[in-house]
C-alpha cells in the first residue's frame, strides 16, 4: 500500500502554535505522530513524505526514522536541510527527490513539497500532491483550493497520520469545502 504525509515537523516546538496543533508539547506531538504512523503503516508499505520531516529538532532525524514502519521516500521540503546532512538519517530513505512522478493504482501523481500551478500531466488528469502551506488560509490556499486535482498532504489536515490516496482525496474535499474533484481542464496546448 502507498501512503502520503507531509509537514510533520518532528521536534519543532513552534509548529504547535503555528498550526494550532492539539498537543500539550513537542514530546506529546512526536509520540502521537509516531504512534499514528505505526498504527497504519506496515513494513512493506511505501510512505511518501512530501517534505519537512523534522525541523529545529533536538533529537536527530534518524531517532524518529528508525521508529517508523514502512519504506520511506522523502520529497525534499524547505526545512529538510538538517535531515539531508545526517548520513544515518539518509540511510532510512528508499529515495530522496525534489520532485517525483509515481503511479498509485490507476492514478498518475506529481509529488512536490511546494504547491505548483501546473504540473506534468495536468491536462491528462494527473494529480499533484503537495505540502508547505500547512493549514493556512492565505492567497496560496485560495489558489490551490481552485486548482484541479491538487491535494495537500499536510499532516494537520489528514489526522496527523499517513493516508492513502483515497483518504487524501476525501480529506482535501472536506478541507477545501468541495463536493467533488474538478475534471481536468481542456487541453490548451499541444504538449504538456
Image (cartoon, rainbow, N blue to C red):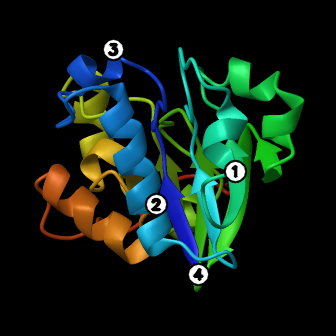
The image quadrant of residue 96 is top right
Locate the N terminus and report the quarter of the image it occupies. Answer: bottom right
Mark 2 or mark 4: whose residue is earlier in sequence: 4
CA–CA distance in space, label 3 to label 4: 32 Å
Real-space CA distance between mark 2 and mark 1, rounded to the nearest whole angstrom: 12 Å
Q: How crowded is mark 3: few (under 14 residues within 10 Å), some or many (20 or more)?
A: some
* Mark 4 residue element: loop
Verify CB contact (< 8 Å) between mark 2 and mark 1.
no
In the image, which is nearer the foreground, mark 2 or mark 1?
1
Marks 4 and 1: in contact by CB < 8 Å? no
Given this view, does label 2 or label 4 mark the residue nearer the observer? 2
* Real-space Cα separation, disc 1 to disc 4, in angstroms: 20 Å
Q: In the rendered image, which residue does mark 2 sit on? A: 37
Picture coordinates of residue 109, whole percent (x, y): 59, 63
Q: Which numbered circle lies on residue 66? A: 1
Q: Nearer the viewer, mark 1 or mark 4?
A: 1
Question: Where does the image place residue 153, in percent across and percent down from the top left?
Answer: 42, 50
Upstream in sequence: badge 1 or badge 3: 3
Q: Do the residues labelled 1 and 3 touch (CB within 8 Å)?
A: no
In the displayed structure, 107 sits above or below 135; it is below
Residue located beneath label 3 in the image: 14
Camera-side mark, 1 or 3:
1
Q: 21 above or below 15?
A: below
Amino acid at each position: 500500500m502507498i501512503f502520503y504525509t507531509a509537514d510533520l515537523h518532528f521536534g519543532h516546538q513552534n509548529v504547535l502554535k503555528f498550526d494550532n496543533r492539539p498537543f500539550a508539547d513537542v514530546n506529546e506531538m512526536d509520540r502521537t505522530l509516531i504512534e499514528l504512523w505505526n498504527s497504519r503503516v506496515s513494513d512493506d508499505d511505501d510512505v511518501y513524505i512530501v517534505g519537512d520531516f523534522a525541523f529545529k529538532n533536538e533529537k536527530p532525524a534518524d531517532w524518529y526514522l528508525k521508529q517508523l514502519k514502512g519504506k520511506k521516500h522523502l520529497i525534499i521540503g524547505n526545512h529538510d536541510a538538517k535531515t539531508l546532512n545526517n548520513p544515518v538519517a539518509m540511510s532510512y530513505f528508499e529515495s530522496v527527490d525534489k520532485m517525483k512522478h509515481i503511479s498509485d493504482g490507476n492514478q498518475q501523481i506529481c509529488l512536490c513539497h511546494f504547491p505548483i500551478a501546473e504540473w506534468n500531466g495536468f491536462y491528462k488528469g494527473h494529480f499533484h500532491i503537495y505540502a508547505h502551506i500547512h493549514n493556512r488560509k492565505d492567497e496560496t490556499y485560495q489558489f490551490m483550493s481552485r486548482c484541479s486535482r491538487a491535494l495537500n498532504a499536510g499532516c494537520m489536515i489528514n489526522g496527523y497520520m499517513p493516508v492513502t490516496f483515497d483518504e487524501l482525496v476525501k480529506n482535501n474535499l472536506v478541507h477545501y469545502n468541495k463536493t467533488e474533484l474538478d475534471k481536468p481542464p481542456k487541453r490548451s496546448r499541444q504538449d504538456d
